[in-house]
Amino acid sequence: MKPNDEPELDRLDLHHHVNLLVLRNKLHLAPLNNPHRVLDIGTGTGIWAMDFADENPAASVVGTDLSPVQPNWVPPNLEFQVDDVEDVWTFPYKFDYIHIRSMSGAVGDWKRLFKQAYDHLSPGGCIEIQEHEVWIRSEDDSIKKAVNISRWQEGLDQASRMIEKPFLVAASMRQWLLDSGFVNVEENIQKVPHGPWARDRELKRIGLFQREQMLEAASSYGCAHFTRVLNWTNEEYEVLAACVRTEIRNPAFKLFSNL
């Protein structure tokens, strides 16, 4: 229940840039060794898959998504496919590396997804999940004053659970992977500021870009959930979204979430 219009596609590319900054310009943290077949689930605009294919010209990369919004001009070792990751996987081969990013709110049964991924990995293959915690916190008690952000994310949580595609999944990923048979599962948690309030220069830079993509997310994330599931009017949601954007811009609020 997310839009795929031009503003949202631009936001997704900005989100990709934030991830690169957080991971210090790395596309992945998995210890890869010349992977031959790579799968990018929920590829979105395809920007991660294109970057990975460029960096690994010997790899055959497949990016899948429900929406065919990816560009036509791509690296020769990259193919995009329209596919629902929650359907039965029909790939005729296995992968050395499977990449999943920012799919919270889009998957109903993560354990089933991980089991299919496990069954489609080559021996010694890796899976990597890069999932933002869809919950805003604060370095101090300023989140208590951000009443509209709290109302927004509580509504998102409620609606996503009602349609059985929950947003709050990041904290459960490690255990679900273990339950699906994966071993040597490592968890790397990074703080992502929403705004330039951090003292650290690099975190301040990350916060600037994250704030901009969150300002866009206040409109794109939630409109369908609030209007179609919680029965708000469009006008009611736009008022809430405007108030959320105001609070995100407030320099007194030291907001962050985890990646």
Image (cartoon, helix red, strand yellow):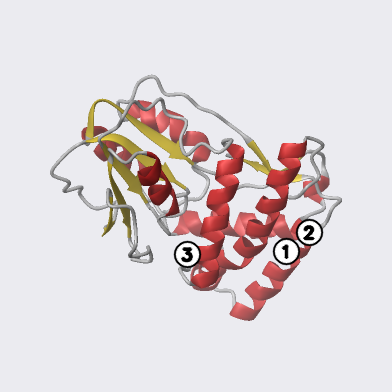
Residue under label 3: 2
Residue under label 1: 245
Q: Going by the image, does 37 lie left or right of 2?
A: left
Q: Which kind of residue does numbered mark 2 sit on?
A: Arg
Picture disc at residue 249: 2
Q: Nearer the viewer, residue 254 or 70?
A: 70
> Is 16 placed above or below 97 here?
below
Q: Which kind of residue does numbered mark 3 sit on?
A: Lys
Q: Where residue 66 sits: x, y (%)?
A: 33, 61
Q: Which kind of residue does numbered mark 1 sit on?
A: Arg
Secondary structure beneath dot 2 equals helix
Number of disc labels: 3
Q: Where residue 41 sits: x, y (%)?
A: 35, 48
Q: Which of marks 1 and 3 is nearer the N terminus?
A: 3
> Is 99 placed above or below 82 here?
above
Tell us which disc is closer to us: 2 or 3: 2
Q: Residue at x 49, y 64 (%)?
A: 9
